[in-house]
Structure formats: C-alpha cells, structure tokens
Amino acid sequence: MIVIRSARTSDRPSLVRFNQALARETEAHELSGDVLDRGIRRLMDQPAYGFYVVATPKEQPDEVIGCTMITYEWSDWRDGVIWWIQSVYVERNWRGQGVFRSLLTHLEDRARREPDVRGLRLYVEDANHHAHRTYDRLGLESASYSVRQKLF
C-alpha cells in the first residue's frame, strides 16, 4: 500500500535527488543540488509558493518513493486558483505500481475540498510519450495551450 503525505524537511535529500533524476531523464539536463536544496527549502518555508507531497510505502513511512510539487496560478476567469502539478517523479523500481495514481488522487481529493481551487494542470515534455499515455489513462485531458517561456 502507498501512503501520500505532505513533504517534511527530512525529505529534502530525496526531493533533490528526484528533481536531479527528473531533469536528467526528461531533458538531459544536470541540476545543481545546492540550488535545488535552497529552492525546495524556500518553498517549504513559504507555503504561499506551493507545497510538495510525497509517496511512501506503508511499511516504510520514511522511504520516499515518489513526489510532486504544487504551485499556484490565480485565474481571474474562474475567480479561483489552479493547482499546477510539477516536479513529478517516481523511483524507477516503483513505476507502474500506482504511485503517481495515488499522488494524483490525493491531490484531486485535497483540491476539491479547497473552496477556491478550480482545477489541476500540468505540463509535460512533448517527447515524453510514456508520461502522455499515463496522464491520458488517468483522465488528464490535453489542453489547447502551448507553453511559451523566457527564463532568466
């Protein structure tokens, strides 16, 4: 059985490692562990930025096997908040065992209990076909938007 809980400060090393693995797997990009640790710590210290949830096996509650981060988007069109699902990662040997499904179910249930949350969104690399299939299976519909960016 998989347990979903809010991330703790003690989970930071796993979150750093997962984000590094995610960047490597999806974009062939190496991320600085120091920068990630500072960013994760800042998010945990300032909940207005968002939050992390982690998945653990019921028998080993300190072993983090998956995670995702939520950040917020204000929608004036909906007079409410959209939760953006980001930094999704599941340990390789736990993939295909319902970890992401558990994370998503937990987030959807939690979001539906929040009066100002209007929905969930995520973005996925175009070439990550496995993730596209997973998200389709779990009812996450493709939106008619393309993400553009200018990073500094």
Image: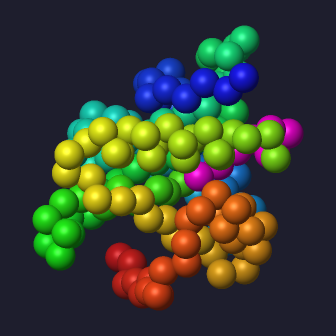
31 or 100: nearer the viewer: 100
In the image, 103: left or right of 60?
A: left
* Residue 90 is inside the magenta segment: yes
Instruction: Pinpoint residue 97: horizontal percent, then vertical percent.
Output: 80, 40
Instruction: Pinpoint residue 78: horizontal percent, then vertical percent.
Output: 19, 69
In the image, 70: left or right of 141?
A: left
Q: Which residue is drawn at 70% across and 52% down?
A: 21
- Residue 150 lies, with reference to residue 136, above or below; the image says below
Q: Give the range drawn in magenta.
A: 88-95
Instruction: Pinpoint residue 141: horizontal percent, then vertical percent.
Output: 55, 72
- Residue 105 lies, with reference to residue 118, above or below; the image says above
In what quadrant of the picture does the C terminus appear? bottom left
In what quadrant of the picture does the N terminus appear? top right
Location of residue 83 (image quadrant) = bottom left
Q: Which residue lies furthest to the top in this view?
A: 59
42 or 35: nearer the viewer: 42
Instruction: Pinpoint residue 133: horizontal percent, then vertical percent.
Output: 74, 68
Q: Residue at x 49, y 57 (%)?
A: 86
Tag count: 0
- Residue 10 lies, with reference to residue 52, above or below; the image says above
113 or 62: nearer the viewer: 113
Q: Residue at x 37, y 84 (%)?
A: 150
Q: Is residue 49 visible?
A: yes
